[in-house]
Amino acid sequence: MNFSELALAEPLSRAIAEKGYDTPSPIQQAAIPPALAGNDVLGLAQTGTGKTAAFALPMLHRLAATPKHRLKISTRALVLAPTRELASQIAASFQAYGRYMKLSVAVVFGGVPIGRQERALFPGVDVLVATPGRLLDLVMKGSCDLGHVEMLVLDECDQMLDLGFIHDLKRITGLLPKQRQTMLFSATLPPAIEELAQRYLRNPVKVAVQPAATTVERVVQSVIHVSQTEKLALLANLLVSEDVASTIVFTRTKHGADRVVRQLAAHKITAEAIHGNRSQAQRTRALTGFRTGEVKVLVATDIAARGLDIPAVSHIFNYELPNVPEQYVHRIGRTARAGRDGRAIALCAPDERPLLKDIERTIRMQLDVQALPPNFRDLVGLTAKLIKASPAAADPPREERGSDRSRGGHSGRDPRAVVHADGRGGGGRDGAPRREGGQGRPGGGRPQQGRPGGGFGGQRTGQRDNGNRRSPAGR
């Protein structure tokens, strides 16, 4: 099959031809025909498989075939995404595919002033891409009307559930017309996603192009066993010794990502961090520098495991193994994109070996074991001296960290003590946990009476990764 056989509207065919698209990817071949026919679609595919076009092209075709006058503060097509970065990329794809259509596309997410977004929505738009929390903010302010939505897409739905958006999704779908086309895309199909599909989809066409846990075929994967305290020395050596063009280094926590950046700086290695505590301007600056090659090392939490389409990533380093084995698949999926090869190297401490076993069981293969460098002991000693000589590389005093406490990291403090400037509590909306990439689990905390934010114990972040709610330190 090629795109000409899909009989897309002429403006769409012209735009995708200019982008050099000829043959649809497997998920596009499977999802576009039933979507064009108006069916609901349940799509299972990993990131990097071309699924944005799998739902964007049918939606744009319908908009071109049935033009309507825009209604104030309304939209005909709504796409929900879990993170700011993914929302921005989806909106950019709609604009690129619809470049020859008289199309209005808006993207809204937290972490930026809401007034500009209200003004963009006021005349009405054809396509709205949004993160759930900010969308509800706009609805509650009377700046967005969802009563005229004809098409709905839930993208990376499993990650939205991991980030605690289930209550927001329920509220949003309750505001939509019953008669609509709905498409749900997910990389995995846990029971919660199946329940969502049964609730929101009507006789859906299910399309799956590969098993959810299949790792990218062009990625060479290996593991190096090393103690936790010696990981930084090993990482610094790998970054200068490996043929690293650009790399993403994954950590489990926000504070850990910041610490790695500081300690790499002591080695004269420039890196940028991206995680939920970074402002939108900081995240945009880091990603822009990474895309242009100005920054070659991006240190990220699992917020970057999906939604970042940067084709030239040569290496992925799992500085800390994820608690959820499926997240490993998403992490290494950031490399070997657009036909390129890639390397994925995991640094495994002794206490992480059970996590490694879970990952190998999930991907149905054992990672090749890579030996430590011959001069590794000297590298560890050098790293200790460099960090000692660089005050900036040391951890800040606990009361000054912010990322682990006031700005929503791990904390034993009652989350209800965190109160936003608008009077809302520090928990998730409607009691939904706010946590990063599924790494935490809600504890036994109780929602506050009379407030939309509920408290949660256990491992939590106190805010959503997409910035829909910012902590006091971030305001």
Image (cartoon, helix red, strand yellow):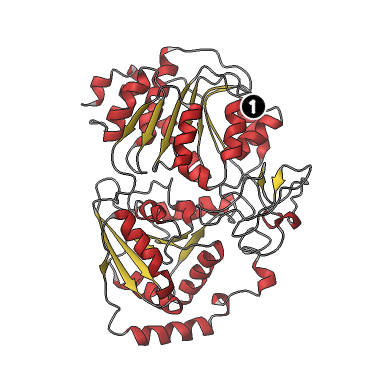
Nearer to the camera, 45 or 420: 45
Q: Circle 1 sits in a helix, a strand or a loop, which is it?
A: loop
Residue 132, percent from left and from top:
58, 37
Nearer to the camera, 428 or 466: 428
Residue 436, percent from left and from top:
54, 54
Residue 355 visible: yes
Nearer to the camera, 281 or 418: 418
Residue 131: quadrant of the picture: top right
Q: How many marks?
A: 1
Vertical placement of 318 versus 110: above or below? below
Q: Which residue is mark 1?
A: 144
Residue 246: quadrant of the picture: bottom left
* Residue farthest toward the left in the current orientation of the protein: 1
Q: Name the residue rendered at 47%, 63% in the picture.
A: 251
Identify the image quadrant of the N terminus.
top left
Residue 139, percent from left and from top:
66, 30
Q: Name the residue rendered at 62%, 74% in the picture.
A: 396
Three-letter amino acid code at the position of disc 1: Cys
Query: Is 322 displayed left or right of 163 in the figure?
Result: left
Nearer to the camera, 287 or 431: 431
Query: Is 359 displayed left or right of 26 in the figure?
Result: right
Vertical placement of 208 versus 242: above or below? above
Residue 246 visible: no
Sort mark 1 into few (<14), some (14-19) or many (20+) by Cα contacts within 10 Å. many
Residue 60, percent from left and from top:
41, 22
Vertical placement of 34 versus 20: above or below? above
